[in-house]
Image (cartoon, rainbow, N blue to C red):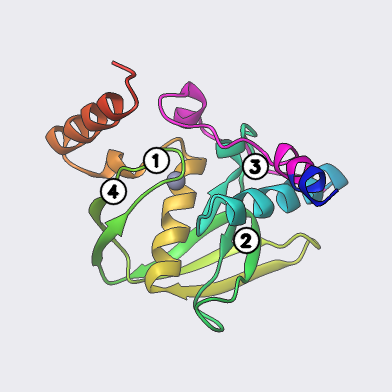
Amino acid sequence: MKTISAIDEKSDLLKIITFPDPLLTRKSERVENITQEIVDLSGKMIKAMIAAPGQGLAAVQVGALKRIIVMDDKSGGEDDEIEPVTMINPEIIDSEGVEINEEGCLSIPTIYADLPRPSSVRVSFTSLDGRHEQIELKGASARCLAHEVDHLDGSLFWDRLSKGRRLWLKMKFFKRFGLK
Ligand code: ZN
């Protein structure tokens, strides 16, 4: 019965939407009340993020236009240890430095580009138990956070590139998936 339960577990996974789904360009709404539905959604988002596998996921990527992100914060423990964090209504309140590094997105599979992001960010958010928190993230975690907050505003990583570069990446994506 091992196989069947594995299949069940898979079919239970939230589907991650991909470009050019129009939802990805929409702005997500603030979460005013942390209901059981929000807690359940965040749990499912963490499962989908780990299964993908990815470092972060915004609710819009699973079709919910709510300001919720989950991420695996690598800044704490070991590299291979998954430390999922849920942030409700995250806001970057301060950032420092610039780092250029390769970035990808679960909603634009197989496409990567070098992109500048702050080397550290201070983010305020509400945790699942309703507490207001502030944390500082650096390096890959700062990049991931900035990437996910962009999703909440309907923006994808290539929107931060020049128009020419963006068009080139879009063409590459369409061609690869036979979309155009
Ligand atoms: Zn993304």
Q: Which residue is mark 1?
A: 109
Earlier in the chain: of badge 3 and badge 1, it is 3
Residue at the location (45% across, 38% down)?
A: 107
Which contiguous range is marked in magenta? 7-34
Q: Kindly give the residue lying farthest to the left in the view shown.
A: 164
Find numbered disc 1 in the image and state the secondary structure of the residue it sits on.
Answer: loop
Report if the CB atoms under discs 1 and 2 are less than 8 Å apart. no
- Give the mark nearer the N terminus: 3 vs 2: 3
Q: Which residue is mark 2?
A: 125
For the residues marked 1 and 2, what is the alpha-carbon distance in whole angstroms? 28 Å
Magenta stretch: helix, strand or loop mostly = loop
Pointer 4: what residue? Answer: 112
Give the Cα distance between marks 3 and 2: 11 Å
* Ligand 1 lies under 8 Å from the Cβ of mark 4: no
Q: Amino acid at mark 1?
A: Pro
> What is the three-letter code of the residue carrying label 2?
Phe
Q: Position of residue 130 (x, y in %)?
A: 79, 61
Residue under the image location 29 percent in, 31 percent down: 173
Foreground label between 3 and 4: 4
Q: Residue furthest top?
A: 180
Amino acid, disc 4: Tyr
29 inside magenta stretch: yes
**Is disc 4 in contact with disc 2, using a CB cutoff of under 8 Å?**
no
Badge 3 vs badge 1, beta-carbon distance below 8 Å: no
Along the line of sight, the residue nearer the viewer: 27 or 42: 42
Q: Amino acid at mark 3?
A: Arg
Disc 2 crowd rating (10 Å Cα; few below 14, some 14-19, many 20+) is some
| Circle 3 residue | 30
* Residue at mark 3 to residue at mark 1: CA–CA distance: 27 Å
